């Protein structure tokens, strides 16, 4: 054994370090200082090297009592550092519902996990959800932490077989990704008929805003009156924040989804008087309740008693009521954003302009995820071909 790793300190004592590779192939080191002379340091190095070769410093995996619950908690503590509230809530929900399931890993020690057990869980998950691989990826990432922390020698997900998922159950009423021009027109006409009244006006304004700008629901719910720039020739909304649910199911204000999401969202000219009407209605109610100086009064949309923000689930309820009245195919709340993109693409708006309006960092995202090819768009291909060939 050579004398590398021995240093002399300013006070005349010596420090020594031993580097070795454990059974997992990971580089490790052990250090000690305060040796009175170099010989003592060399002797200590020799002793530690023999112990390392004998495996005395290896982790006793089976004796470790860390539970899967504790491992998930540690993983989420790290996950929270660089993810937004909505992603944190989503990941926490997935892990708690299916990983910390009472019939599976709730209360189980990490040291008890093996490939056979994980394969059985994966098989079970494949029969529960069509999208079960989303959940297996989350659990696999958690167990990577277990390997890194030397709670497991290897990730039991390695070599796992992923069965075909259970067939996706089709709803009684079909659900589509986005409405085309005719469907969106019918949706908005029905929404106006249903909600354009003193009692429900904010519902009409919010649904129209979502459908006519392509804004995300979180961006709309976070709007403050100061974000509206309607004195310009081209009125717009300054999109600079969003709301999300944290792990305690509380609404929080966040920065937008990405840097590209900070943008000017241009609005139709007819929406300015709609906001003015709503502002007057809101101000009268705040005045009656003596809440004109309340912090919540600076926000455009609040719940009925001005005590908090509106939850997206409530807006989704308003949307579904309109869909039912109009007898349209079912659509998610986020589908209004996709409908906006689809209708704008139908009318020939340049994709790069549409991408900027939606707050995307690239046009591929706009095309791949938000623009549906409608029948009218496909029908144009026949005309464009005949014009190009011109026989």
Image: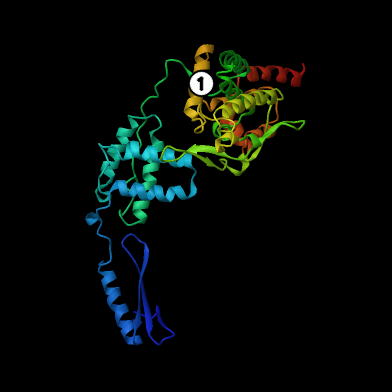
Please tell me which residue lies in front, 356 or 279.
279
Please tell me which residue lies in front, 218 or 79.
218
Please tell me which residue lies in front, 149 or 233.
233
State the colouring used for the structure image.
rainbow
Q: Residues within 10 Å of mark 1 (few under 14, many from 20)?
A: many
Residue 5 against residue 206 in the figure, above or below = below
Residue depicted at 47% across the width and 17% down the height:
174
Q: Quadrant of residue 385?
A: top right
Residue depicted at 56% across the width and 22% down the height:
203
The image position of residue 100, as x and y in percent, is 31, 40
In which quadrant will I find the C terminus? Answer: top right
Q: Quadrant of residue 1?
A: bottom left
Please tell me which residue lies in front, 106 or 51.
106
Residue depicted at 22% across the width and 56% down the height:
63
The image position of residue 284, as x and y in percent, is 60, 26
Q: Quadrant of residue 298?
A: top right
The image position of residue 307, as x and y in percent, is 49, 33
- Image position of 337 (left or right of 81): right
Residue 156 against residue 4 in the figure, above or below = above
- Image position of 86 (left or right of 165): right
Residue receiving disc 1: 318
The image position of residue 107, as x and y in percent, is 25, 44
Residue depicted at 28% across the width and 66% down the height:
57
- Image position of 329 (left or right of 50): right
Q: Is residue 115 visible?
A: yes
Which residue is farthest left? 63
Residue 11 against residue 349 in the figure, above or below = below
Total marks placed: 1
Q: Is residue 338 visible?
A: no
- Image position of 325 (left or right of 97): right
């Amino acid at each position: 054994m050579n004398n590398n790793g021995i240093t002399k300190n300013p006070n005349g004592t010596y420090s020594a370090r031993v580097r070795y590779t454990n059974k997992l192939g990971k580089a490790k080191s052990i250090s000690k200082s305060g040796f009175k002379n170099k010989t003592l340091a060399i002797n200590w190095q020799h002793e530690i090297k023999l112990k390392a070769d004998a495996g005395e410093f290896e982790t006793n995996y089976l004796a470790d009592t860390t539970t899967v619950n504790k491992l998930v908690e540690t993983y989420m503590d790290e996950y929270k550092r660089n993810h937004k509230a909505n992603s944190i809530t989503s990941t926490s929900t997935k892990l708690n519902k299916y990983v910390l399931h009472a019939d599976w890993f709730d209360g189980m020690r990490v040291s008890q996990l093996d490939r056979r057990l994980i394969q059985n869980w994966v098989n079970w998950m494949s029969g529960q959800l069509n999208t079960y691989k989303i959940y297996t990826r989350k659990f696999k990432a958690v167990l990577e932490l277990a390997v890194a922390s030397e709670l497991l020698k290897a990730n039991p997900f390695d070599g796992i077989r992923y069965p075909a998922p259970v067939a996706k159950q089709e709803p009684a009423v079909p659900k589509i990704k986005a409405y085309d021009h005719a469907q969106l027109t019918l949706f908005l006409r029905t929404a106006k008929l249903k909600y354009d009244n003193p009692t429900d006006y904010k519902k009409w304004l919010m649904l129209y805003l979502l459908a006519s700008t392509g804004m995300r629901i979180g961006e709309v719910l976070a709007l403050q009156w100061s974000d509206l720039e309607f004195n310009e020739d081209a009125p717009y909304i300054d999109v600079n924040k969003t709301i999300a649910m944290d792990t305690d199911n509380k609404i929080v204000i966040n920065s937008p989804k990405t840097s590209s999401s900070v943008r000017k969202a241009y609005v139709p000219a007819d929406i300015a008087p709609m906001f003015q009407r709503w502002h007057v209605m809101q101000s009268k109610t705040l005045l009656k309740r003596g809440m004109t100086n309340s912090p919540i009064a600076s926000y455009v949309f609040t719940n009925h008693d001005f005590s908090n923000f509106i939850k997206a689930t409530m807006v989704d309820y308003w949307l579904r009521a309109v869909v039912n009245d109009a007898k349209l195919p079912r659509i998610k709340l986020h589908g209004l954003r996709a409908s906006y993109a689809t209708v704008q693409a139908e009318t020939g708006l340049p994709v790069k302009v549409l991408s900027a309006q939606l707050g995307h960092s690239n046009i591929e995202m706009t095309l791949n995820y938000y623009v549906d090819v409608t029948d009218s768009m496909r029908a144009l291909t026949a005309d464009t071909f005949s014009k190009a060939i011109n026989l």
